[in-house]
Image (tube, rainbow, N blue to C red):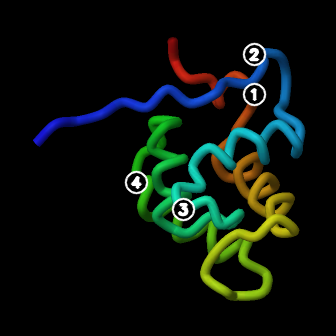
Amino acid sequence: MAFMRYDYRALPRQGEATVEEFRAWAAQFDADGDGRLSKEELQEALRSLDVWFAWWKAREALRDADANRNGAVDGDEMGRLYAFARRNLHVKAADLQDGS
């Protein structure tokens, strides 16, 4: 089994990430290109940040951000996901870097 590391687009390293920067960063994890983030896609995004218990935090993020309860974070709900990430994961622009 081969492990692959993806290089995700990074954000500027200064201060807090804006909602637009966060949205652009999160869009990289939309594997099926449907414009929504599923729990699995959120989990992959959290793994890229080296967040412990990414599966659990992805579930909590989806519960918090998914206002219409369709099982994914839609475009209008991205602001809620951003608020969750700042409040519970303390996400800043520097955290959204690709690590290289």
| Eye-nearest disc, 4 or 1 | 1
Alpha carbons under labels 2 and 1: distance apart: 6 Å
| Eye-nearest disc, 4 or 3 | 3
Q: Amino acid at mark 4?
A: Phe
Tell me the SS state at disc 4. Answer: loop
Alpha carbons under labels 4 and 1: distance apart: 21 Å
Circle 1 residue: 93
State if disc 1 and disc 2 touch (CB < 8 Å).
yes
Tell me the SS state at disc 2. Answer: loop
Alpha carbons under labels 1 and 3: distance apart: 25 Å
- The location of residue 29, given as percent across then percent down, is 57, 49
Task: Identify whether 42 is placed above or below 47.
Answer: below
Depth order, front residue of 1/77: 1
- The location of residue 34, given as percent across then percent down, is 65, 66
Label number found at residue 53: 4
- Label 4 or label 1, whichever comes before in sequence order: 4
Alpha carbons under labels 3 and 2: distance apart: 28 Å
Residue count near mark 1 (Cα–Cα under 10 Å), binned few <14, some 14–19, many ≥20: some
Q: Residue 61 falls in which quadrant of the image? A: bottom right
Q: Residue furthest left?
A: 1
Label number found at residue 13: 2
Circle 3 residue: 32
- Label 4 or label 3, whichever comes before in sequence order: 3
| Eye-nearest disc, 1 or 3 | 3
- Residue 92 relative to residue 51: left or right: right
- Label 2 or label 1, whichever comes before in sequence order: 2
Q: Amino acid at mark 3?
A: Asp
Q: Residue 53 falls in which quadrant of the image? A: bottom left
